[in-house]
Image (cartoon, rainbow, N blue to C red):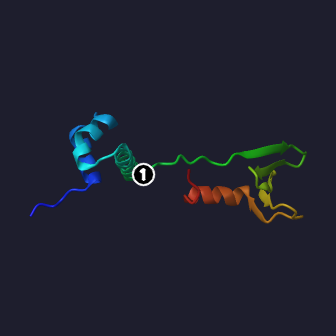
């Protein structure tokens, strides 16, 4: 016994065979089966939705911009780092003896590293591009 096709399946098959057919042409060809313009529009919308969901969209990821203000005092360079919409992130202090990071509202650096220790880390391969 043959399976009876519904209106939407008939429209799908017609569109597969005649991809350039207009809505009016599809309705005319299938009017004996009770197919309306609304049915054709629904099937076309479903086909479009299904095909777009099969190809995943790749979102481009961009880094958040960082604003840098540079003050150059006699004892070194202070780089004030502020994130886009995040406020102050901290200050990077570069001196002759090394580098330090000071978090916002802190009086002392939270992390300090000497140039000698930084060079040792770089030579060990722990710091790479």
The residue at 76%/52% (across/down) is 85
Picture layout, residue 1 above or below residue 19: below
In the displayed structure, does residue 46 sit left or right of residue 85? Answer: left
Q: Quadrant of residue 72?
A: top right
Q: For this rendering, which residue is in front, 114 or 56?
A: 56
Q: Quadrant of residue 91?
A: bottom right
The residue at 40%/50% (across/down) is 49
Would residue 38 be visible to someone looking at this image?
A: yes
Q: Position of residue 114 (x, y in %)?
A: 74, 59
- SS label for mark 1: loop
The residue at 78%/51% (across/down) is 82
Which residue is the site of mark 1?
A: 56
Q: Position of residue 84 (x, y in %)?
A: 74, 49
Would residue 12 be visible to someone looking at this image?
A: no
Q: Position of residue 41 (x, y in %)?
A: 38, 44
Crowding near pointer 1: few (<14 within 10 Å), some, many (20+)? few
In the displayed structure, does residue 33 sit left or right of residue 47? Answer: left
Q: For this rendering, which residue is in front, 34 or 71?
A: 34
The residue at 26%/42% (across/down) is 15
Q: Quadrant of the N terminus?
A: bottom left
Picture layout, residue 65 above or below residue 20: below
In the displayed structure, does residue 40 sit left or right of residue 32? Answer: right
């Amino acid at each position: 016994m043959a399976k009876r096709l519904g209106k939407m399946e008939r429209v799908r098959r017609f569109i597969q065979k005649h991809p350039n057919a207009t809505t009016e042409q599809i309705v005319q060809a299938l009017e004996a089966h009770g197919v309306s313009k609304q049915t054709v529009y629904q099937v076309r919308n479903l086909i479009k939705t299904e095909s777009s969901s099969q190809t995943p969209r790749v979102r481009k990821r961009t880094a958040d911009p960082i604003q840098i203000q540079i003050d150059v005092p006699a004892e070194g360079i202070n780089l004030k780092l502020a994130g886009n919409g995040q406020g102050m992130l901290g200050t990077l202090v570069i001196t002759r003896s090394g580098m330090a990071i000071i978090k916002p509202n802190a009086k002392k650096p939270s992390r300090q590293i000497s140039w000698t220790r930084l060079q040792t880390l770089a030579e060990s391969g722990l710091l790479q591009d």
